[in-house]
Amino acid sequence: MTFEDYRALDGIALADLIAEGEISPREAMDCAIAAAEAVDRSCNVLTYRRFEAARAEADRARIEPGKFCGLPFLLKDSGLASTDLPTSIGSALFDGTTATEDATLTTRFRDAGFLTFARSTVPEMCMAPTTEARRNGGPTRNPFALDRSSGGSSGGAAVAVAAGVVPIAHGSDGGGSIRIPAAACGVFGLKATRGRVPMGPFRGEGWAGLAADGVLTRSVRDTARVLDLVAGMEPGAPYAAPEGGDFEKGLATPFARPLRIAVWRDPWGVPVDPACLAGLDHTAALLASLGHEIVPIDPPDFDYPGFLDAIVAVMASNIALSVRKKLAASGREPTVADLEPAILDGYRRGTTMTAPDYAEAVNVVHATGRMMARMIDGYDFILSPALTSPPIPLGMLSMDEPDFRAFRHHAGEVTAFLAVVNASGQPAASLPLWRHEGLPIGLQLIAPFGRDDAILRLAARLEETDTWKSAALWPALPDMPR
């Protein structure tokens, strides 16, 4: 199989060829590893590698219909526990951290048939909307413009999917970290409803319920099948999504009536680049041409800077917890050799925060979730840009910023449409529906809580349009295999 043949297939198509014996899991793995090495040279997308072990697993892979058996896969370097691969969470301090037990989701990925051959890059402690970790030896570059950000924190995953290394890669989203890189790299990224995808057994929630795991893909049906295989209530979990399933089968179900779609342009006064608004207008017109009702809306009054301060408090407290546990045996404090300046300041903020400070931050997050639920009331979806700008230049958001609060407020200017949806726990996806001067522009669909199925169904309909097909292009990178 040539690389061009390999990367032209989505995960389901590739798994079908493997199941039918047209290609072997080893052939697919060899294609993925060769592509990964080429893309890594250009874009810096890999951390820990287990190439030979993955090849051996491919040689003995068992094939089960309806799964992704034998499919090459990447785990995000986010700390999701795996006995196969260490993790660094993008940080020198945590480099080489190992696990003695798999996370529930890791087990479900393995049971779904995925063969993990490496981890993908992240910013330090997944705390940035761009993947530029010092620990990784340089930034993860956007494959469509190497001087631009890939987004973050699932930056390496998005680049790998966009470049054709793998059709499906693990990601996670605590403030947009699936949707940001999906938008920046022109792939599909769904943040599922809170509680849909398991987070155990080592924790019940991430970042006060803001975080969710998932995948980035090049086809909607791949995401739907992944949800069918890995989603579902985990015993003892503090959150549960409404019951749902048959996401892949449901893609073919037409909507019984025209949809009522709210169009959101103004994220509380944060400026939005005209290129993103052009994509929004084009997508709204496309949905209207499909027979749906388009309703411009203004968001409710909301203290967005105050919400960002709450996010700072939640993130800083989690930095402090993780770093203290890591350094407990030594009893020392972290230094600039351990953590980048912004994260080091986040640690200091977290260690000086009071319990009432944290409780108030959680209250703000919860109030934000209720505001978003009111905002979507009466609509089937909210449509917005995913980001407020095209992919940003590398270095524009740097962890060299010594003030964690200032860093996160700057990040919040780029992601003003995103983290509020983490607060509400609603499902939301970035769809590759626009281009500006060759750069991908993602558009976000937000649905009511629990309606992951509705997002997938509408995204699948949009995937059939020329708009999607013309925007979801392969990047041109040097030294790609043939």
Image: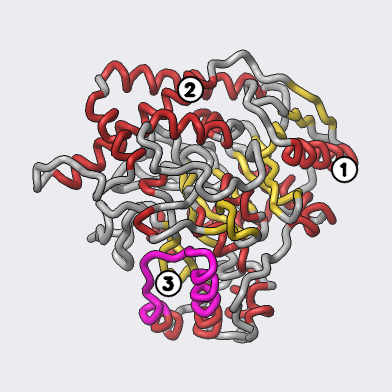
**Magenta-tinted stretch:** 32-54
Q: Is residue 132 above or below residue 410?
A: below
- For marks 2 and 3 on the same chain, the one whose residue lies earlier in the sequence: 3
**How dense is the environment of label 3, judged by Cα within 10 Å: few (below 14), some, or many (20 and up)?**
many
Give the residue type at disc 1. Leu
Binning the other alpha carbons within 10 Å of mark 1 as few (below 14), some (14 to 19) or many (20 upward) gives few
Q: Secondary structure at mark 1?
A: loop
Select label 2 or label 1 by which is in front. 2
Mark 2 vs mark 1: which is more N-terminal? 1
Give the side of residue 22 with respect to residue 80, left or right. right
**249 lies above or below 52:** above
Give the residue number, with chain letter if any, for mark 1. 290
Q: How many marks?
A: 3
| Distance CA(mark 2)–CA(mark 3) | 38 Å
Q: Earlier in the sequence, mark 3 or mark 1?
A: 3
The residue tagged 3 is 117
Mark on residue 11?
none
Asked whether 353 falls inside the magenta stretch, the response is no
x%, y% of residue 282? Answer: 83, 41
Residue 52 lies in the magenta-colored region: yes
Residue positioned 58% across, 48% down in the render: 393
| Three-letter code for the amino acid on which mark 3 is drawn | Phe
Disc number for residue 307: 2
Q: Nearer the viewer, residue 471 or 107?
A: 471
